[in-house]
Image (cartoon, grey):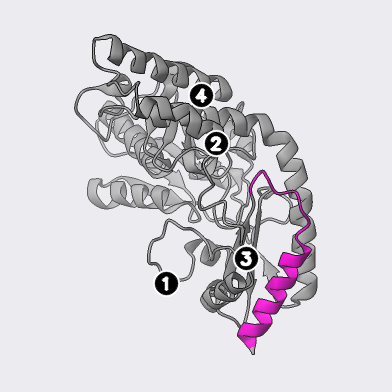
Amino acid sequence: MLYLDHAATTPVRPEALEAMIPYLTERFGNPSSHHTVGEAAASALDDARHRVAAVLDMRAGDIVFTAGGTESDNLAIKGLAIGAALRRGGPVHIITTPIEHEAVLASCDYLERVHGYAVTRVPVDETGRVDPDAVAAAIRTDTALVTVGYANNEIGTVQDVAALARVASAAGVPLHLDAVQAAGWLPLRDTGADALSIAGHKIGAPQGTGVLAVRGRLPLEPLLHGGGQERDRRSGTENVAGAVAFAIALELAEAEREEAATRVAALRDAFIARVLERVPTAQLTGHPVHRLPGTASFTFAGTSGEAVLLELERRGVVSSSGSACAAGADEPSHVLLALGIPPDVAQTSVRFTFGHDLRDDLAAVADAVAASVAAVRS
C-alpha cells in the first residue's frame, strides 16, 4: 500500500519516538514539581523550547506548546484578538480569507457571532492566492489581526507571505500565519509573521503535539486558565514527552527541508503532467507554480471523488478528497468553492500529498489514477 496522504498526518519519526520514551517511563515527572524528578522534566521542557525557538529564530519565551494545530490557531486568533480588545476597550476587526482551515474560520466566526467582532474575509483568485493590496485595503483603524494560511491544506497554494507581512507591519497590525502545512517544506524563519501555528503530526512528531510561536510583546489572552503554565499563556500540566518529540521532529524536518523540497517538487511536477495527460478532463487545483512541493490536487469532472478514492485504494494507493479535519463532512470543499469551482465539480476532488521520503517516480500512480477515473465513469 502506497500512502499519499501526508497532509493529513505523517508517521512518527523513529528519532522522535526514541527521544520521548524516557519521559513516558523513568523521567515521568511533572515539570512544575519542586523536586529532582520534576526538575528533570522541567529541564527537558526548557531544552525543547529553546530548540524549537532556534529553528524559528524566535525567543524561547515566545514558544507555547499546545495539543496541535487546531489549538494553536484558536489560541492565536482568539488570544490575540481578545487581548487587543481588552486593551482597546471594545470589539476589534480581524482579516482572513475564505479558504482557511476550519480552525481559523471557526475561530473568527465564534468571535464574530458571540462577541460582536468584525471579520473581513478577503477573496482569493482562482488559484487560491490573496492579493496583498486587497488585504491592505481591508485594514481599518480597529483592525487587530491578519490571519492567513502560509500554504493551503487542500490545494497546496503558497501565499506571498513577505508581501502580506509588509502590509500588516506598515499598518501596525500583527500577522498570524497558519504554518501547519508549510512546516518542513517552506522557510519558517524571516517570514515577517508575529505568530506561527505548527502541528507536530505533520512533521513526524506524535499526534496531539503542536506549537504556537507568538511574539512576547503581544497581549495574548489564554484559552485555558489554571496553573499559569507556559508563561500564563496555556495552563495545564505540560506534555513533556510530546514537546521533546516535537523539537526533534522539527529540527529534522528543517534539516531535510531544502533537499526534500527540490526532489519532491520534481517528482510532483512529473506526476501532475502525467495525470493531466492520461485524464484529459482532469483539472489541477491551486496555483501551478506557488504550491507546496508535496501537494498535487485535482478535480475529475463527471465522477465522484469518494468513488475514485475507493478505486485507488483497491489499486494500492491511499489518498484523500481534501482536509481530514472536517469530520463527517459531505458538502463541497469551501476552499474549492472559494476558487469559483462549481459545487458538483468540487465534489470530485482528490488530493495526493507526499512525504520527505518520496524518491520514486509516480508514473504508476498516475496510471492508477487514470484507471480509477475510467472505472468510476464506466
- Which x, y percent locates residue 267? 77, 53
Q: Which-is-in-front pick, marks 1 and 2?
A: 2
Label 4 and label 3: CA atoms lie apart by 34 Å
Does dot 2 land on a helix, a strand or a loop? helix
Residue 213 visible from this viewpoint: no
Q: Which-is-in-front pick, marks 1 and 4?
A: 4
Label 1 and label 4: CA atoms lie apart by 37 Å
Placement of the N terminus among the 4 image quadrants: bottom right
Disc number for residue 330: 1
Q: Place residue 78 in its image quadrant.
A: top left
- Which x, y percent locates residue 101? 46, 52
Mark 2 belongs to which amino acid? Pro
Sequence-wise, the earlier of marks 1 and 3 is 3
Q: Which-is-in-front pick, marks 4 and 3?
A: 3
Q: State whether the magenta stretch is mostly helix, strand or loop.
A: helix
Residue 60 visible from this viewpoint: yes
Q: Residue at x 47, y 37 (%)?
A: 197
Disc number for residue 352: none
Does dot 3 land on a helix, a strand or a loop? strand
Residue most extreme to the front:
26
Sequence-wise, the earlier of marks 2 and 4 is 2
Disc number for residue 14: 2
Residue matched to label 3:
317
Residue matched to label 4:
52
Mark 1 belongs to which amino acid? Asp
Q: Which-is-in-front pick, marks 1 and 3?
A: 3
Sequence-wise, the earlier of marks 1 and 4 is 4
What span is in magenta?
355-377
Sequence-wise, the earlier of marks 1 and 2 is 2
Task: Check disc 3: other Cα within 10 Å, few if <14, some if 14-19, many if 20+.
Answer: many
